[in-house]
Amino acid sequence: MNKFVLADPKLCIGCRTCEIACALSHNGERTDNLSQENFFPRLSVIKTFDVTGAVMCRHCEDAPCASACPNGALVRMSDTVQVIQEKCVGCKTCALACPFGAMAIRTFKTPRSFGGKPWGFDYKAQAQKCDLCADRPNGSACVEACPTDALRVIDAQEMQQIRQQRQQKAVVEAV
């Protein structure tokens, strides 16, 4: 089973600290380079009248986003689903296939050249999603930063424990 970050809406206060931590984590932890143009968290805090919570990639076992990708840019690695940016062409098929709305498409400027000399800019679109901060030694930045502990990483063992607790609760309530 793939790992993923579970958000508990009962604990979430909608402060968006997780979004900031995520953007910083993927920006090399540099606060001087964090502006509206390059603020791209890989999760979204959703607020409604009665509930607030973070929405992010669930690293699905069957990963509809990966199945939909025509270039094979989404792959399973180390119990996660990752985007291989070099293969992504920004076609947005993965975003349409994701049942959680966790895929984001980021458009950014890339330098263009003509005859080997710089000549303006092009725009390139790429898929982005939660990568569980795979390159970060301390693990997921959003989990570490959450002031109410509303986020936690779930693995196969913890999923089994939750399942057993719910089964036991169901048996007790049936009596």
Image (tube, rainbow, N blue to C red):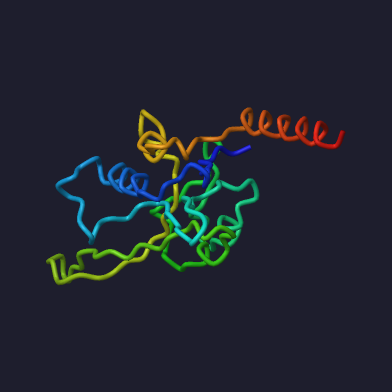
Q: Quadrant of residue 138?
A: top left
Residue shown at 44% from the left, 40% from the top:
132
In the rendered structure, the answer to whether residue 71 lies left or right of residue 13 reads right
Compared to residue 159, the image places residue 67 above or below, namely below
Q: Is residue 89 left or right of residue 173?
A: left
In the rendered view, tell whether residue 172 sits above or below residue 10: above
Q: How many marks?
A: 0
Quadrant occupied by the N terminus = top right
Q: Residue at x 26, y 46 (%)?
A: 27
Q: Position of residue 94 (x, y in %)?
A: 52, 62
Residue 4: where, in percent of width, then height?
A: 53, 41
Outermost residue toward the right in this view: 175
Q: Quadrant of the C terminus?
A: top right
Q: Position of residue 97 (x, y in %)?
A: 58, 63
Q: Position of residue 16 (x, y in %)?
A: 35, 50
Q: In front: 141, or 96?
A: 141
| Residue at 48 percent of width and 55 percent of height | 73
Q: Residue at x 32, y 43 (%)?
A: 21
Q: Give 112 or 78, whichever is nearer the viewer.
A: 78
The residue furthest left is: 117
The quarter of the displayed image where residue 161 is located: top right
